[in-house]
Image (spheres, rainbow, N blue to C red):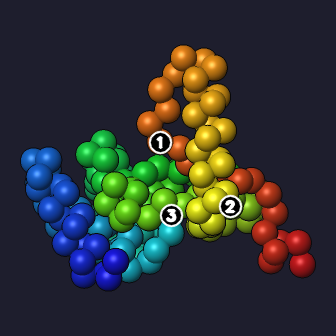
Amino acid sequence: MAQTELVDTATHYLLDRGVRLTNARRLVIRSLVDHPGPRSAAELDVAMRRRVPLSSIYRTLLTLEESGLLTRLRDGDGVAKYELSERVTGDHHHHFVCSQCGRTTEVAIPKKLEEAITRLIDAIGSERAYEITDHRLELDGVCEACRA
């Protein structure tokens, strides 16, 4: 999905749920679209050139997460990072998290493997009488740069 289309989709997603589009929310959405991948509040603050107070960024992230627009992840240091949710992007993926530098990178899994993962997760849910509605994998390890 093109960047402009993604911003429009995110905007309509919020409006359809009755979420007001403040300047801070627009800037956070634009920053997440312009800089793909999970971002922390501090990273968004820098990317937005400190045009929004950090406290407003945190409140905005919470509101956008509660609306379902954003998905929250944790990096290797436990820092919360956010990205546009699959509901908005249509992009199902998982993440590698480096336990040394904290870098989080997206990893797309080939369709056959994703189907196998889904079957495994559904079987686990079935054993526990739990209806699985979604899944995300965060694979912890050490990235290539840190291993060098």
Q: Position of residue 132 (x, y in %)?
A: 49, 32
Among the 4 quarters of the image, the one containing residue 91: bottom left
Instruction: Name the residue that disc number 3 marks.
Output: 38
**SS label for mark 3:** loop
Of the image marks 3 and 2, the number of the one nearer the N terminus: 3
Q: Is residue 93 visible?
A: yes
Q: Residue at x 11, y 52 (%)?
A: 16
* Disc 3: CA contacts within 10 A as few (<14), some (14-19) or many (>=20): many
Which residue extends farthest top? 129
What is the CA distance from the residue labelled 3 to the residue labelled 1? 18 Å
Instruction: Name the residue that disc number 1 marks.
Output: 134
Amino acid, disc 1: Asp
Residue 96 is tagged as 2
Q: Position of residue 99 (x, y in %)?
A: 76, 56
Count of numbered badges drawn on the protein: 3
Q: Is residue 27 visible?
A: no
Which residue extends farthest right? 148
Amino acid, disc 3: Pro
Q: Quadrant of the N terminus?
A: bottom left
What is the CA distance from the residue labelled 3 to the residue labelled 2? 11 Å
In this picture, is 59 found above or below 129? below
Among the 4 quarters of the image, the one containing residue 98: bottom right
